[in-house]
Amino acid sequence: MTDELRNRLSRLDPMASDVPAEPVTTESSRQLLEDIMTTPTVEQPESGTLNKRPWLVAVAAVAVVIVAIGAVGLLARDGGGDPIAATPPLELNAGGEDPMAMCIAFSVEELAKMQTAFEGTVTSVDGNTVTLDVGTWFKGGDAGQVALNAPQGLEALIDGFPFEVGSQYLITAWEGNVNYCGFSAASTPEMRAAFEQAFGS
């Protein structure tokens, strides 16, 4: 180290030259060094950061609210805990089958071939429309509601049955048309067991 550099450093040192310095090899010096090295640093906010925080907090709060509303709006859970999306109601034609058509004998194997299958509770019967809240989708959909559109007197059709508000039904459909001949009916333990066997619980 040159004399000039030593002089510059001594002018920068705030400690007076006549103050005794403790050697770094002493126990107290080592402890002081250890304390310095293990003390966590705390970063101070930059100028203007505190002024920015209120709007950042507000934006974060709005984002949380939007996410929460979206989660509630997009999902509704059935009794079994399976998520059902809150999509527009699925519309099916429940006009009944051709009275002259031959029915396929009911079996779990034939039931499993159906394109659409669900269990729902009738919430309204309004004119020609029966609306059901879906409790369980077995196959072919994810809507929270299904609207069955049919002419009045549906129960008089071949193998038809009346829909009553508050009652549960197991419904199947093929190409948008409700199946009868035993493939759609009021929900009973036996019928639900057949659906669970055909489509899985």
Image: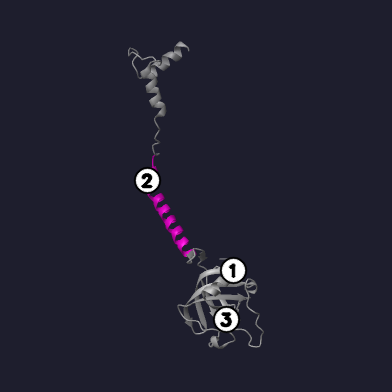
Q: Please provide percent x and percent y for residue 109.
A: 65, 72
Q: Residue at x 65, y 74 (%)?
A: 110
Q: Earlier in the sequence, mark 1 or mark 3?
A: 3
Of circles 1 and 2, the one toward us is: 1
Q: Tag 1: Cα neighbours inside 10 Å, few (<14), some, or many (≥20)?
A: some
**What kind of element bears circle 2?**
helix
Label pair 1/2, CB-CB below 8 angstroms: no
Task: Give 66 or 32, whichever is nearer the viewer.
Answer: 32
Mark 3, other Cα within 10 Å: few <14 / some 14–19 / many ≥20: many
Residue at 40 percent of width and 24 percent of height? 34
Circle 1 residue? 197
Q: How many marks?
A: 3
Q: Nearer the viewer, mark 1 or mark 3?
A: 1
The amino acid on which the numbered mark 1 sits, given as a three-letter code, is: Gln
Q: Nearer the viewer, residue 41 or 176?
A: 176
Q: Nearer the viewer, residue 95 or 161?
A: 161
The residue to which callout 2 is attached is: 51
Magenta segment boundaries in residue numbering: 47-74
Q: CA distance from mark 3 to mark 2?
A: 63 Å
Q: Give how far apart the Cα atoms at labels 1 and 3 are.
A: 25 Å
User: Considering the numbered disc 1 on the image, is that residue within a helix, a strand or a loop?
Assistant: helix
Q: Is residue 60 visible?
A: yes
Q: Nearer the viewer, mark 3 or mark 2?
A: 3
Q: Which mark identifies residue 94?
A: 3
Answer whether residue 60 is magenta in the image.
yes
The kind of residue on which mark 3 rests is: Ala
Upstream in sequence: badge 1 or badge 2: 2
Instruction: Examine the image and state in which quarter residue 15 appears.
Output: top left
Instruction: Please provide percent x and percent y for residue 129.
Output: 51, 81
Amino acid tagged 2: Asn
* Quarter containing the C terminus: bottom right
